[in-house]
Amino acid sequence: MKTTTLNPERRLSSGMTSFVRDIFPKIWTLGVGAGMAGIWLELFGEPASLALKMAGVAIWAGTSILFTLTSRSLRDVWLHGSKLIVSSEGRPEEIPLEDVLEMSETRGQKVKTIKVVLRRGSAVGQTFRFIPRHAFQAPFSEHPVIGEIRERRKQLVGDSGSGQLPS
């Protein structure tokens, strides 16, 4: 292993990660649920048909469940020396960079996420996602956070110059 000077602990995930995972699903469920209750109780002046009420409840319940399920795998992530520190429900888990098997990012979404796949499972699972901190990114290029993790891993384990994680 190479000896190299490494930056101190650095947060890779955005503050939006916690908001999207912990707060937004609750705000959505309560807010839209209150609106649906108002429709059922006819608090908005005009009565709605039973079919419209049932459709509204189905959409509200479905989106509330969907938001909760899709945000559960979001984690807070820091890069510290030769490890990723990944917070799972307030409990930090240290993951050696050598255990990172693959990284990918979403494209064409308003909230970009980075997906990390590990060689073996951990307390955070074998796969986790996070919303990266904002950084300038040229179109069709790799997010700078992914590049930073790849470069740090390359410094530590001497990956080939391709910058790609081994399969």
Image: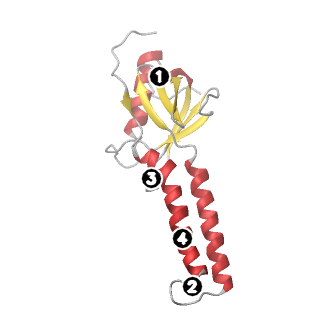
Per the image, the residue denoted by label 3 is 111
Pick whichever of labels 4 and 3 is earlier in the sequence.
4
> 45 and 1: which one is in front?
45
Q: Are marks 4 and 3 in contact (CB under 8 Å)?
A: no
Could you tell me residue 151's position as x and y percent?
40, 26
Helix, strand or loop at mark 1: strand
Q: Quadrant of residue 163?
A: top left
Could you tell me residue 92's position as x and y percent?
51, 29
Q: Do the residues labelled 1 and 3 touch (CB within 8 Å)?
A: no
For discs 4 and 3, the disc positioned in front in the rendered view: 4
Q: How crowded is mark 2: few (under 14 residues within 10 Å), some or many (20 or more)?
A: few
Helix, strand or loop at mark 2: loop
Per the image, the residue denoted by label 1 is 83
Identity, as a three-letter code, of the amino acid under mark 4:
Ala
Per the image, the residue denoted by label 4 is 34
Q: Quadrant of residue 3?
A: top left
Pick whichever of labels 2 and 1 is earlier in the sequence.
2
Could you tell me residue 91's position as x and y percent?
53, 31
Per the image, the residue denoted by label 2 is 42
How much space separates mark 4 and mark 2, taking CA atoms? Answer: 12 Å
How much space separates mark 4 and mark 3, taking CA atoms? Answer: 26 Å
> 6 and 154: which one is in front?
6
**Residue under the image location 63 percent in, 82 percent down:** 52
Pick whichever of labels 2 and 3 is earlier in the sequence.
2
Identity, as a three-letter code, of the amino acid under mark 1:
Lys
**Residue under the image location 48 percent in, 56 percent down:** 24
How much space separates mark 2 and mark 1, taking CA atoms? Answer: 55 Å
Q: State left or right for residue 120 relative to residue 31.
A: right
Q: How crowded is mark 1: few (under 14 residues within 10 Å), some or many (20 or more)?
A: many
**Residue under the image location 41 percent in, 23 percent down:** 80
